[in-house]
Image: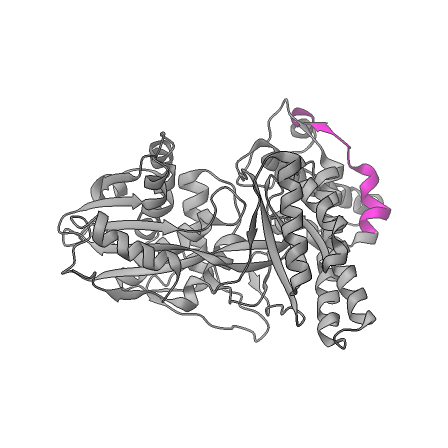
């Protein structure tokens, strides 16, 4: 297991934390990559298909057993930023607390980062994979060093959770096993309450990480980022249909084609109000459409006994949506109006604010149309793989894929009411420099600041085009953009390593 953060972590443990991480005792080390959201983004929670790439930047985590029942976490990233970088709690206090109490504890200034690490032990105990009440169970020291840009929409939090979880799981001796249940895709239960508490699948491990983020950090994220960081392979696009989590065969890129990111330097946060509002609006749109389906059935003397969308907006046919349902969606609606008209709201991670205006029609448009855009994007890339290289046919197919990225970006801004002016500028600069060998771009992840993803040639001309984009971006905004390139393999495939520090 080699990567820059792993080497840096081991060196710093020896020189800066020799009293905590001792040289004569074995420690376990893991790494998990960040991720670049290529297509899909927020459609994860509407059952869409997501395409993500594991990055060549990693979070590295070390875990070593202590001689007492304390848990101590260290972050070298926080230390380098002159921020609080340690957090300690006893095993007994951890397992006695509720998730709400721990969320309050971790929400205190300078402590949120520790939830992603220490929270792994809490959910493993709570879900029955380890008994931390046993008096023979010792505590742990955990430490992290990461080269994934923080707050850039590159899955830095998911990588920290996955690296921490897999290190602790292997250290505790919990077995890991993956299997292909149907020959078509890995459809494994994420529910950590399954009867088997001796073995974890990739989806179950990612699901435990999601619990950490949802319950102990309070972020309403889905499973895609954690599963990509866990299970992606380098050089491929990880694909999953989020209904709830069926892993598909990976998507390969055409020869001499790459996907890169440009970090805008604008902080990205899933917990921001705009993201939560867009998510809530999508679930409101889903409920309004389902109730309209029931009403249409009653008018012809038929009762709707099953949900034709099977719980997800992504399953709604685009033509049916435009013909039968879009006209009934309000452009905007107060939360209280929805609550007065509809008895049910289907999102377990958010709630409706009575005085808030929700852009229901536009957000629903984005999710239904995006499902079609993603399918076409994948189809064009697959056709480009089969097309002869250096031909007009191949270039046209790549152009079509790239322009679907532009369309996705535009919908994110105008329909979903997300986006940022800085990322919009970067996308326009990609369009301006297409002749350098760039095919398209879009704002990545939840669509709030962060990173723009670009489909590009592997060529010196494209290199110069990307550099020129960043120069022009800096000239217009004063911000320094960062190129994110390379791909990496998920923590599940890399595994963990047990070793001793050099004395």
- Residue nearer the viewer, 346 or 85: 85
Whether residue 434 appears in this view of the structure is yes
Count of number-bearing discs: 0
Question: Is residue 60 depicted above or below 419 in this figure?
Answer: below
The part of the chain drawn in magenta is: 320-337
Which of the 4 image quadrants contains residue 25?
Answer: bottom left
Residue 277 counted in the magenta span: no
Q: Is residue 443 left or right of residue 232?
A: right
- Residue nearer the viewer, 466 or 133: 466
Taking the spot 74% from the left edge, 75% from the top edge, the residue there is 389
Which of the 4 image quadrants contains residue 437?
Answer: bottom right
In the rendering, at what x and y percent does residue 82 appear? 34, 35
In the rendering, at what x and y percent does residue 232 appear? 51, 64
Question: Is residue 259 depicted above or below 154 in this figure?
Answer: below
Q: In the picture, which quadrant includes the C terminus?
A: bottom left
Question: Is residue 95 depicted above or below 53 in this figure?
Answer: above
Colouring method of the image: one colour
Q: In the picture, which quadrant includes the N terminus?
A: bottom left
In the rendering, at what x and y percent does residue 238 appear? 57, 63
Q: Is residue 427 left or right of residue 301?
A: left
Taking the spot 67% from the left edge, 47% from the top edge, the residue there is 469
Give the prevailing secondary structure in the magenta stretch: helix
Whether residue 303 appears in this view of the structure is no
In the rendering, at what x and y percent does residue 152 appear? 53, 44
- Residue nearer the viewer, 151 or 102: 151
- Residue nearer the viewer, 179 or 481: 481
């Amino acid at each position: 297991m080699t990567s820059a953060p792993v080497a840096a972590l081991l060196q710093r443990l020896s020189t800066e934390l020799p009293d905590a991480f001792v040289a004569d005792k074995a420690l376990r080390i893991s790494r998990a990559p960040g991720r670049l959201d290529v297509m899909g983004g927020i459609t994860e929670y509407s059952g869409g298909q997501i395409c993500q790439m594991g990055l060549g930047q990693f979070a590295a985590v070390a875990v070593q057993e202590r001689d007492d029942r304390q848990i101590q976490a260290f972050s070298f990233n926080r230390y380098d930023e002159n921020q609080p970088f340690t957090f300690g709690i006893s095993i007994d206090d951890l397992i006695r607390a509720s998730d709400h109490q721990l969320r309050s504890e971790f929400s205190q200034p300078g402590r949120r980062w520790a939830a992603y690490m220490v929270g792994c032990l809490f959910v493993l105990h709570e879900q029955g994979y380890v008994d931390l009440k046993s008096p023979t169970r010792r505590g742990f020291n955990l430490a992290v060093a990461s080269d994934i840009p923080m707050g850039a929409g590159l899955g830095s939090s998911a990588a920290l959770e996955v690296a921490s979880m897999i290190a602790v799981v292997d250290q505790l001796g919990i077995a890991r096993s993956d299997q292909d249940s149907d020959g078509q895709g890995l459809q494994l239960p994420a529910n950590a309450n399954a009867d088997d508490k001796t073995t974890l699948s990739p989806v179950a491990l990612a699901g435990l990480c999601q619990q950490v983020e949802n319950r102990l950090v309070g972020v309403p994220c889905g499973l895609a980022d954690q599963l990509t960081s866990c299970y992606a392979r380098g050089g491929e696009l990880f694909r999953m249909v989020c209904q709830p989590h069926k892993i598909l065969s990976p998507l390969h890129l055409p020869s001499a084609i790459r996907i890169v990111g440009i970090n805008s330097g604008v902080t990205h946060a899933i917990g921001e109000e705009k993201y939560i509002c867009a998510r809530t609006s999508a679930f409101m749109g889903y409920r309004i459409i389902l109730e309209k389906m029931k009403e249409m059935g009653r008018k012809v003397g038929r009762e709707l006994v099953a949900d034709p969308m099977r719980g997800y907006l992504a399953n709604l046919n685009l033509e049916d949506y435009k013909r039968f349902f879009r006209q009934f969606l309000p452009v905007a609606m107060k939360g209280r109006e929805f609550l007065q008209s509809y008895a049910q709201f289907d999102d377990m991670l958010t709630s409706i604010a009575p005085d808030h205006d929700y852009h229901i029609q536009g957000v629903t448009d984005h999710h239904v149309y995006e499902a079609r855009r993603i399918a076409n994007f994948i189809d064009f890339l697959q056709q480009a793989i089969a097309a002869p290289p250096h031909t007009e046919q191949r270039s046209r197919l790549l152009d079509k894929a790239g322009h679907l990225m532009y369309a996705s970006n535009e919908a994110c801004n105008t329909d979903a009411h997300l986006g940022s002016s800085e990322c919009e500028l970067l996308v326009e600069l990609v369009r301006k420099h297409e002749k350098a060998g760039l095919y398209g771009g879009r704002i990545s992840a939840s669509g709030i600041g962060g990173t723009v993803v670009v489909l590009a040639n592997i060529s010196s001309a494209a290199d110069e085009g990307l550099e020129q984009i960043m120069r022009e971006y800096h000239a217009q905004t004063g911000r320094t953009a960062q190129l994110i390139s390379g791909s990496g393999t998920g923590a599940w495939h890399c595994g963990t390593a047990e070793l001793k520090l050099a004395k």
